[in-house]
Amino acid sequence: MTKNLYSIKFRIWITGKEGTFLGQGRVDLLKKIRDLGSITEAAKSMKMSYRQAWKLIQSMNAQSQTPLVLTETGGSGGGGSKISSSGLEAIKAFDQLQEKINLLLEKEKALFS
């Protein structure tokens, strides 16, 4: 085999009895909400409908012991959304798991090189 010809790809899904709890897309959505402070803006930046983003947030919040995304209703001061401390912990844990798996796969790639 030729060296560096192959790479190993993977996707992580953390599931519960109600289906997917976290995956890369959901974590990316959480990060966008964290950075932009808005579900609408996060959805737009990901080329996702607001309805789909809201559906994912409701699913994550329902499966978590405490909500990952907190929302404030609009009004004269406007609304907004933010990631709770549980949401920040979920992002961190997912990213750490992904990094550990990346390191393992990098070592295993030698089997195919």
Image (spheres, rainbow, N blue to C red):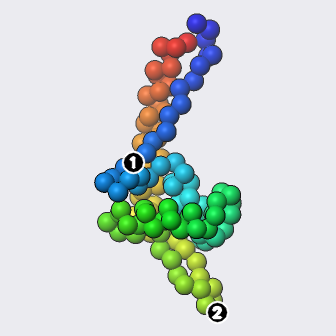
Q: Is residue 68 above or below residue 17?
A: below
Q: Which residue is drawn at 45% across and 61% down?
A: 88
Looking at the picture, which amino acid does disc 1 mark? Ile
Which structural element holds mark 1? strand
Residue 7 figure quarter = top right
Q: Which residue is drawn at 47% across and 27% down?
A: 105
Q: Residue at x 52, y 71 (%)?
A: 82
Looking at the picture, which amino acid does disc 2 mark? Ser
- How many neighbours does mark 1 have within 10 angstroms: few (below 14), some (14-19), or many (20 or more)? few
> Picture coordinates of residue 110 (x, y %)?
50, 15
In the visual, does 98 lie left or right of 6? left
Who is closer to the viewer here, 8 or 18?
18
Work out how far the residue at label 2 is from the one at label 1, CA to CA, in angstroms.
39 Å
Q: Which of marks 2 and 1 is in front?
A: 1
Q: Mark 2 points at which residue?
A: 76
Q: Which residue is drawn at 53% across and 68% down?
A: 54
Q: Mark 1 points at which residue?
A: 14
In the visual, does 17 lie left or right of 57? left
Sequence-wise, which precedes: disc 2 or disc 1?
A: 1
Question: If the image is split into quadrants, where does the C terminus sit?
Answer: top right
Residue 31 figure quarter = bottom right
